[in-house]
Image (cartoon, rainbow, N blue to C red):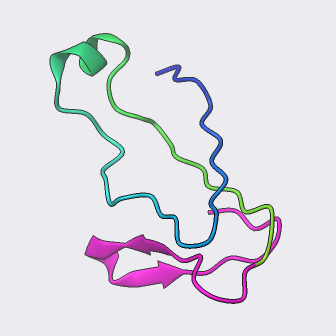
Amino acid sequence: NGEAIQILRYQNGEKYSPHFDYFHDKANQELGGHRVATVLMYLSNVTKGGETVFPNSQVNHLLQLTGGL
């Protein structure tokens, strides 16, 4: 799979809605299928919020500046 890189900058109160990093539809399957990996990089620290949640693992991740997941 060769998707374009996605860069997001969150303002106060913004969030990324829960989603799965795999595809069921035929169009994405024909473009290379499921993602092999997803990498999250954090470029600043936050004092409140800012967690990455994996609902099925029951673990929340709060990373610090230059941390990666």
In the current view of this chain or complex, which residue is farthest to the left? 25
Q: Toward the viewer: 20 or 17?
A: 17
- Kindly report the secondary structure that dominates the magenta region of the rendered protein: loop
In the current view of this chain or complex, which residue is farthest to the front? 12
Residue ID at (70%, 62%): 68
Answer above or below: position of 57 versus 18: below
Q: How many marks?
A: 0
**Residue 56 within the magenta-colored segment of the rendering:** yes
Residue 51 placed where, x, y %? Answer: 54, 77
User: Is 22 displayed left or right of 4 in the figure?
Assistant: left
Residue ID at (26%, 73%): 56
Residue 9 placed where, x, y %? Answer: 67, 53
Task: Determine which quarter of the picture holds residue 58.
Answer: bottom left
Answer above or below: position of 68 versus 21: below
Q: Toward the viewer: 65 or 39?
A: 65
Residue ID at (73%, 63%): 42
In the current view of this chain or complex, which residue is farthest to the bottom? 47
User: Is 17 displayed left or right of 50 in the figure?
Assistant: left
Answer above or below: position of 28 versus 39: above
Quadrant location of the C terminus in the rendered image = bottom right
**Residue 51 within the magenta-colored segment of the rendering:** yes
User: Is 42 displayed left or right of 57 in the figure?
Assistant: right
Q: Toward the viewer: 48 or 29?
A: 48
User: Is 52 displayed left or right of 57 in the figure?
Assistant: right
Task: Determine which quarter of the picture holds residue 50.
Answer: bottom right
In the current view of this chain or complex, which residue is farthest to the top? 30
Residue 10 placed where, x, y %? Answer: 62, 60
Residue 16 placed where, x, y %? Answer: 44, 58
Q: Which residues are magenta?
A: 46-69
